[in-house]
Image: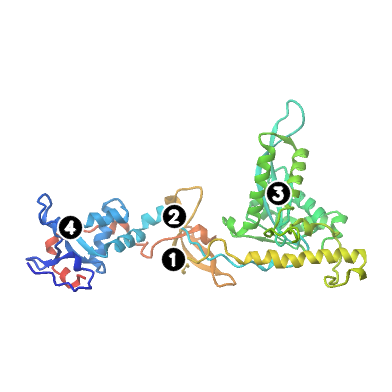
Amino acid sequence: MYKNKAKTKSNLKNLNIFMDENKLLRVGGRLSNVFQFDYNKKYPILLSSKHHFTYLLFRHEHIKLLHAAPQLLLFTIRETWWPVSGRNLAKRVVHECVVCTRFRGKTLCPLMGNLPTKRLAISFPFAVSGVDYFGPVLILNRKGRGAKLTKAYVSLFICFTTRAIHLELVGDLSTDAYLLALKRFISRRGKPAEVFSDNGRNFTGLMTEFSKFLNNCADNIRDYAINNNIKFSFIPPYSPHFGGLWEAGVKSCKHHLKRVLGNAHFTFEEFSTVLTQVEAVLNSRPISPMSADPNDFSPLTPAHFLVGRPLTSPASEDYEQAALQRLTRYQRVEQVRQHFWTRWSKEYVSELQVRTKWMKSGDSLKEGTLVLIKDDNSPPLKWSMGRIVSTFPGKDGVSRVAAIRVASGAITRRAFSKICPLPLDAADNVNSWKLELPRPGACQDVERNAA
């Protein structure tokens, strides 16, 4: 038996290494006086975690132990072997296991994107809007006894710039019902230049029917509608966080409705009245932090931007620095409105600089990477598998959407939050990981590769 010749600064100095009669490096340890353990348990063979044999050994034991966690995997291997830096190798093997990766279902989380230009453009309220549905809500078909409950839905329009909210009660999720809600929205708020929404079937069907709606709408709506059609834009499918602006509006609206309605049921007219009152409350909420100084201005709210302009009001000159005594009444109203936009740029826009989450970008996807497409309604082992065809980087160079070719040959687009990348060797057959390990005394080449 040879003495421990490990260097003083080596990470092996506390293992009391020696070489046995087969010239295998073993760990001396402190278990020599324990007789109920076998020889390999008391003096495990030293292995290098960088050697391919050690990696295969860990992968074999991981499958043999029914995909054990890193700690159980390491403790089981240490019954016979002593891998140097074995904990890191155990974590690596578990991380690269295809089955374990599928069960974890961990998706990518890219860096939070920059604010789009439309969120910071100074324009009339609802010039660029987002729309979403929520519900269903139960309403009475009539008053009195024998009334039946029917389903209805709430359509929410939100302004990208001022975060003002407009609520409409609709009877169903059809395209026709949405067209009627859009008519009421345009009649009261003005025609938007662009509308963003998710990929709901009722919104997608609207693109082909809205041009007919503009051509056949009433003259009083067409007077203040601009000549070009409204542009409809859709976020990627199954990516609600791309529409976080209107999702936050839905959350705030539900907060008030649950507390006001309780278990009561209203008719269509009564429920519409409640929605109008909730809309007024939401449009009176501050959009910038409130100051504790009583001499400061009142908090800026979306309602400041919603009053004081007709639907056909023309563009006005800049009266912000003009003297009050020289202005007419109309010019004074315009000066107040322009003052709100100055406060908006100073108080509200500065608050948008901070990233509240997704503060660092995760791993990016490369072309040909094998991935799983996350489905919230099915377990991870039922998720569809595909390969990345291409990614779509944004203006900041960070990709957040990818095109995926699935088994049928079709190409679908998904956001990174719905993509779960598999390890690089995911195409390997899992059954090929099972191998016949040699007996502890048969590894004559371990000495040359030991740490």
Q: Secondary structure at mark 3?
A: strand
Sequence order check: which comes first, mark 1 or mark 3?
3
Where residue 237 sits: x, y (%)?
Answer: 58, 57
Q: Is residue 371 left or right of residue 308?
A: left
Quarter of the image containing the C terminus?
A: bottom left
Instruction: Give the residue type that dot 2 points to.
Output: Gly
Packing grade of label 4 (10 A; few <14, some 14-19, many >=20) is some
Question: What residue is shown at x 64% (from left), y 64% (from top)?
Answer: 351
| Disc 4/disc 1 C-alpha distance (Å) | 37 Å
Pick whichever of labels 1 and 2 is earlier in the sequence: 2
| Kind of residue indicated by mark 3 | Ser
In the picture, the disc for residue 369 is 1
Check disc 3 and report the residue beneath it: 155
- Residue 336 sits above or below residue 249 on the image: below
Real-space Cα distance between discs 1 and 3?
Answer: 39 Å
| Residue at x-position 29% and y-position 61% | 87
For marks 4 and 1, give the one nearer the viewer: 4
Determine the secondary structure under disc 1: loop
Q: Nearer the viewer, mark 3 or mark 4?
A: 4
